[in-house]
Amino acid sequence: MSEDSEAEMPRYKCHKEVWAFKISKIHMNDKNDWIITPTEEGYMPLHVSYSFINKHNPQVGGYYVVYKDGYRSFSPKEAFEEGYSRI
């Protein structure tokens, strides 16, 4: 927030439910497909598009996130773990 502001901006608390997994590996396979591998066992690696990689710049240790409306995104570890608890 700028020092020039006279009042603090309104604050918001997140109350959304999402589907997500922590990322253990991101790589390109021999077919030039991008693969994101979850840290949790029992889940298959996920194929994602180059446009997803380019737009969201996912990183190992962060979270692959799917929202209720189907939107898919990436959240850095600190931001995700500060805002979400597993249910």
Image (cartoon, rainbow, N blue to C red):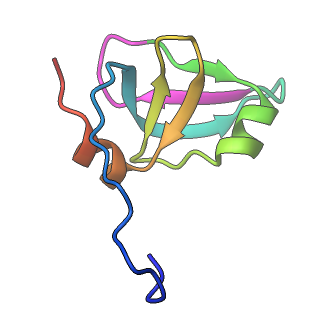
Horizontal and vertical percent for residue 26? 58, 39
Q: Nearer the viewer, residue 41 or 23?
A: 23
Q: Residue at x 31, y 54 (%)?
A: 78
Tell how many labels.
Answer: 0
Q: Is residue 77 above or below residue 2?
A: above
Q: Which residues are magenta?
A: 34-43
- Is the C terminus in the top left, top right, bottom left or bottom right quadrant? top left
Q: Is residue 16 magenta?
A: no
- Is the N terminus in the top left, top right, bottom left or bottom right quadrant? bottom left
Q: Nearer the viewer, residue 50 or 42?
A: 50
Displayed quadrant of residue 36: top right
Q: Is residue 44 above or below residue 64?
A: above
Horizontal and vertical percent for residue 10? 35, 55
Q: Nearer the viewer, residue 71 or 27?
A: 71
Q: Is residue 76 above or below residue 45?
A: below
Q: Is residue 42 magenta?
A: yes
Report the side of 43 relative to 25 (left or right). Answer: left
Report the side of 83 relative to 60 (left or right). Answer: left
Q: Nearer the viewer, residue 30 or 74?
A: 74
Q: Residue at x 25, y 34 (%)?
A: 84
